[in-house]
Image (cartoon, rainbow, N blue to C red):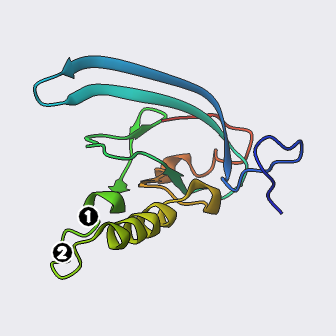
Amino acid sequence: MNRKKGDKGFESPRPYKLTHQVVCINNINFQRQSVIGYVELTIFPSLANLNRIKLNSKQCRIYRVRVNDLEAAFIYNDPTLEVCHHESKQRNLNYFANAYAAAVSAVDPDTGNGELCIKVPSELWKHVDGKYKCTL
């Protein structure tokens, strides 16, 4: 059973432990309201067969993902970007709030989900045994 984060016995549903994070912002464009940069994450897998890593990354455009210096295939899906875009009949705040809550819960990290799903390159599967460091 998962507990609240402040509780002593909190267990993450994620199959890895994040040990280090670097955020580098290369450019801020105020006119386009955008930020360009990258994130480097260091994780330790807690499963022997970790072949997919799910991360939260809302409202991003991701160009490349590398795992231990190897290009990795990835899927990015942010359901909050499409809330009510195709709905023309319901135009009220209550409908939007419910649709947005459903979209957010679809990528809830406490249920092992995320907007970014990274496929760990097969060359690394033999190393992903819970004792090996992965740098994303």
Q: Position of residue 78 (x, y in %)?
A: 34, 57
Which image quadrant: the N terminus?
Answer: bottom right
Q: Residue furthest bottom?
A: 89
Disc 2, SS: loop
Visible residue check, residue 77 = no
Q: Identify the residue at horizontal 25%, vertical 26% (top origin).
A: 36
Would you name the residue on which mark 2 appears? Answer: 86
Q: Is residue 97 left or right of residue 51?
A: left
Q: Position of residue 93 (x, y in %)?
A: 32, 66
Among the 4 quarters of the image, the one containing residue 7: top right
Would you name the residue on which mark 1 appears? Answer: 82
Q: Are marks 2 and 1 in contact (CB under 8 Å)?
A: yes
Among the 4 quarters of the image, the one containing residue 20: top right
Disc 1, SS: helix
Q: Is residue 94 left or right of residue 84?
A: right
Q: Is residue 105 above or below residue 26?
A: below
